């Protein structure tokens, strides 16, 4: 306890905990929607797009890579959701193409144009979120809080509409709900969470942060509301625990959080099995 108290006296640790919990909460809300809409893999695809955008912003020495990464990821999310339902290249195929292409492009750009001497370290940090969560500036924390408030507010305000679009888009359309508008909102929320989560777990582990809380909660609970609430609690507790273990033990932040998510998922899975 004494060690924890000492670490909490450092601003960068408090920043990491605040941002980590906010990202975990937002990711859990998104995860329920994506799992039910069978778009679980979209987080992974968009994280690779964000990786490509980060690589370009690094080459151009942008002081705030959010200026490029966030708009690019939002556009990619909109294209994936629209293309997945209307285009000739459907669902997982379009996600895979964009994911692999963006990852390859990003790594190529970093190799050819990077002026830094530690290319492997830069790539590792971007992919796995090694220490970036512990080097957040006050400005980035404020931006994260603003974006998180937007995501949570949008989810709460449009809960009924998002619920309808998630469960049966055709029926929602027939009842007069503008499904295109709410799918656009979902796409923007996805992109924001992916960009924020890169600081916490890196681009390769984002899907775990999004999917595990929702899947674990679905093992135990059945209603949309109870799954959403359980998913939020699951994600926040696992992330906070992972952050504390990482800070105290010196383990990689993203990998630690994901491993705790996996362990907790199996506990929920066993509870669900024994409960039936």
Image (tube, rainbow, N blue to C red):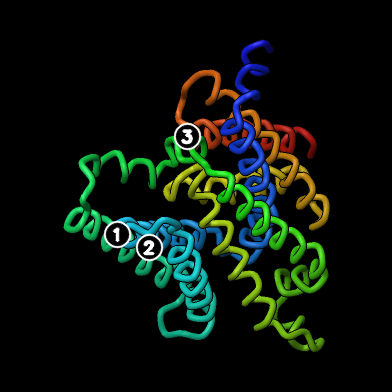
Label 3, residues with CA under 10 Å away: few <14, some 14-19, many ≥20:
many
Count of numbered badges drawn on the protein:
3
CA separation in Å, label 2 and label 3: 23 Å
Query: If you read the primary sequence from the N terminus, does the residue marked by circle 2 or circle 3 appear first?
Result: 2
User: Where is residue 249 drawn, in percent x and y?
Assistant: 51, 18
Please tell me in which quadrant of the rendered image residue 244 appears. Answer: top right
CA separation in Å, label 1 and label 2: 7 Å
Taking the image as shown, residue 135 lies to the left or right of residue 215, namely left
User: Where is residue 229 drawn, in percent x and y?
Assistant: 79, 48
Q: Front-most of 128 and 64?
A: 64
CA separation in Å, label 3 and label 1: 22 Å
Label 1, residues with CA under 10 Å away: few <14, some 14-19, many ≥20:
many
Query: If you read the primary sequence from the N terminus, does the residue marked by circle 1 or circle 2 appear first?
Result: 2
Taking the image as shown, residue 2 lies to the left or right of residue 99, namely right
Q: Which quarter of the image is occupied by the N terminus?
A: top right
In the rendered view, tell whether residue 241 sits above or below residue 169.
Answer: above
Label 2, residues with CA under 10 Å away: few <14, some 14-19, many ≥20:
many
| Number of the front mark, 2 or 3 | 2
**In what element is the residue under mark 2?**
helix
In the rendered view, tell whether residue 91 sits above or below residue 36.
Answer: below
In the rendered image, is residue 89 in sight?
A: yes
Residue at label 1? 106
Instruction: Confirm or deny contact between disc 1 and disc 2 (CB under 8 A).
Output: yes
Residue at label 2? 53
Residue drawn 73% across the image and 85% down it:
178
Q: Which quarter of the image is occupied by the C terminus?
A: top right
| Number of the front mark, 3 or 1 | 1
Residue at label 3? 255
**In what element is the residue under mark 3?**
helix
Taking the image as shown, residue 74 lies to the left or right of residue 184, namely left
């Amino acid at each position: 306890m004494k060690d924890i108290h000492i670490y909490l006296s450092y601003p960068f640790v408090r920043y990491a905990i605040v941002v980590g919990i906010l990202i975990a909460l937002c990711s859990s809300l998104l995860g329920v929607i994506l799992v039910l809409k069978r778009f679980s893999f979209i987080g992974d695809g968009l994280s690779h797009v964000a990786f490509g955008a980060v690589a370009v912003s690094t080459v151009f020495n942008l002081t705030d890579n959010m200026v490029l990464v966030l708009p690019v990821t939002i556009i990619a999310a909109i294209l994936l959701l629209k293309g997945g339902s209307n285009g000739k290249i459907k669902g997982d195929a379009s996600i895979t193409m964009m994911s692999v292409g963006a990852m390859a492009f990003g790594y190529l750009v970093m190799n050819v144009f990077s002026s830094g001497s530690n290319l492997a370290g830069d790539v590792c940090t971007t992919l796995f979120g090694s220490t970036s969560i512990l080097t957040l500036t006050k400005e980035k924390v404020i931006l994260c809080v603003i974006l998180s408030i937007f995501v949570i507010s949008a989810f709460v305000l449009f809960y009924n509409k998002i619920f309808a679009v998630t469960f049966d888009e055709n029926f929602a359309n027939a009842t007069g709900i503008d499904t295109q508008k709410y799918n656009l909102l979902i796409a923007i929320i996805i992109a924001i969470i992916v960009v924020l989560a890169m600081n916490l777990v890196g681009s390769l582990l984002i899907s775990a942060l999004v999917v595990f809380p929702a899947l674990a909660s679905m093992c135990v609970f059945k209603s949309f509301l109870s799954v959403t609430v359980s998913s939020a609690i699951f994600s926040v507790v696992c992330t906070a625990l992972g952050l504390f273990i990482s800070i105290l033990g010196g383990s990689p932040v993203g990998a630690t959080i994901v491993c705790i998510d996996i362990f907790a998922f199996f506990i929920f899975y066993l509870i669900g099995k024994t409960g039936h």
